[in-house]
Image: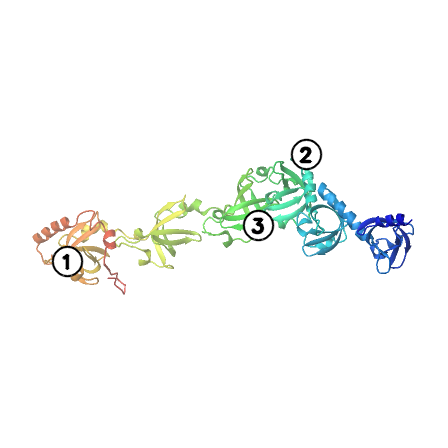
Amino acid sequence: MAELLAKGIREFRENSIVKGRILEVRPREVLVDIGYKSEGIIPLSEFDDGEELQVGDEIEVLLCRLENDEGMVILSKERAAYRQNWEKIVKVFEEGGIIKGKVKAAVKGGLMVNVGVEAFLPGSQIDIVPPKDLQQFVGGTYEFKIVKINNDRKNVVLSRRELIEQERAEKRLQFFDAHKVGEKVKGVVKSITDFGAFVDLDGLDGLLHITDITWGRLGHPSEMLKLGDELDLVIIDLNKEKERVSLGLKQTQHNPWDKIEERFPSGTKVSGKVTNLMPYGAFVEIEPGVEGLIHVSELSWTKRIARPSDVLTVGQEVEAVVLGVNKEQQKISLGVRQLDPNPWDQIEVKYQIGTQIRGEVRNLTAYGAFVQLEDGIDGMVHVSDMSWTRKVNHPSEVLKKGDVVDAVVIDIDKQNQRISLGVKQLDEDPWKAIDQRYKIGDLVKGKVSKIATFGAFVELEGDIDGLVHISQISEERVEKVKDHVKAGDEITARVIKVDKTERRIGLSIKAANYSEEEIAKEAAAFDSAIKPGTELVGLEQAFAAAAEEYRPGDSSKKK
């Protein structure tokens, strides 16, 4: 008997799993018989269903200690279950299987999950997109993949994301096999970007580009879509290799551009609302989904409009005329100025060449002055048409903004909408009869108006300039003109040259007291000194080379 008893005792090893039978269920503990000489005890808290325990039930427990100080056997149901579960988890991990578990709590960086043992689920492995609120998962039961085990520390790391990605990959393959271009599908808006929206097609993301959301103008997809929206869409492209699906929302609606040319032929008067303003024009919606462009040049026949925003505002109702339709590019050209007659169509009748007009100087440029003939129509007086006798370098020398001037229409360019005006044409050209007013040998008086390196210009009667060449200033050799005459000096000189064709008069100070014979000699000398194409080719180059300037009425001199 002693040998049998000793043999039985040796079969019981601490930290081993044994079977036992419930002898008694107490308020805080359960009494269990494992066939040892004394009964074992297990805290009631180790049982999930303590109220359902029955005397005689057989359970597996871990033998923690054969005897404590009171001679009782210490047992644990939880530790037995943990060891059994750990072995199961290791086997699942090795086989790459799936395990179910219940989320116990949200902790820093993820979730704690009960899969028979306590396991950790990192936040990045909860879903495809890491959720912001982890509490929503607490209490839920899910399937997981075991991605890491540490036997020494008994740590388990789980992933739910891998299962979701695997499931979505299977659904993607199924989607491409089951659908084709042109089919209608349902999807839920998953995310919104500047260029469109990504739509969840039950596991597969499709792109709804901004250009395929509506037939009309859309600044941003969020103007029509929001997260969670369920949409009826059309598949417009499938790429199985790249797993891409292009979707269309506007394709589920009537295309407003169908038969657009029949509904809006050129010349049709339309009305609509300004939807957008750009530097080059204004977009106007003439019906839902259909916009036309009013180019800035089509806003007015006569006004120079720099930007459409100067005359239009977004939301403004406007009328326009259809100028052209391009169905393929879905473009309609509109014009506002076509609502009124083009004043330039009758410009040649209203302002015939030779007509004398009066207008206000509206603007000055380097080459002329713009004179307003009527609202929106200007004519230009070029600097070369301001005086018969004076070389006008800049219009500000004779005109200023706001002056009211008389002029003559001298040319009309209808195509380029230009009217050329002349002020000098109001008077007879004095050079036509210059040889009658000034003859060689005449003694004249005048005021020095300009000094040049080659001579001095003298203003004669009738606002006509004559030139005293440097060789005609003095009998002595002259090195510098300004050492002998200055702008504003009154001088007396002889006319020694009159050239009607070249519009020039040659003068000589030193010949003021010469005889006719001597004057003839100086005239010949003058011709040889002033070579055509050099110093005295009209007044243009001479004035440009002047070192000093003087104008009648000016209070200053330039030296």
Q: Provide residue 247's location: percent of width, then percent of height.
A: 64, 40
Picture mark count: 3
Tag 3 residue: 275
> Gap in Å between the C-alphas at discs 3 and 2?
43 Å
Q: Residue at x 9, y 56 (%)?
A: 514
| Residue type at tag 3 | Thr
In the drawing, does residue 407 fall left or right of residue 54?
A: left
Q: Is residue 3 visible?
A: yes
Tag 1 residue: 479
Q: Secondary structure at mark 3?
A: strand
Comparing labels 1 and 2, the label whose residue is closer to the camera: 2
Q: Secondary structure at mark 2?
A: helix
> Gap in Å between the C-alphas at discs 1 and 3?
74 Å
Comparing labels 3 and 2, the label whose residue is closer to the camera: 2
Q: Earlier in the sequence, mark 1 or mark 3?
A: 3
Contact (Cβ within 8 Å) of mark 3 with mark 2: no
Tag 2 residue: 177
Comparing labels 1 and 3, the label whose residue is closer to the camera: 1
Q: Residue at x 72, y 41 (%)?
A: 95
| Residue type at tag 1 | Glu
In the drawing, does residue 268 fall left or right of residue 66?
A: left
Dot 1 surroundings within 10 Å: few (below 14), some, or many (20 or more)?
A: few
Seen from the viewer's position, the closer of residues 148 and 463 is 148
Contact (Cβ within 8 Å) of mark 1 with mark 2: no
> Gap in Å between the C-alphas at discs 1 and 2?
102 Å
Quadrant occupied by the C terminus: bottom left
Q: Provide residue 255's location: percent of width, then percent of height.
A: 62, 39
| Residue type at tag 2 | Asp
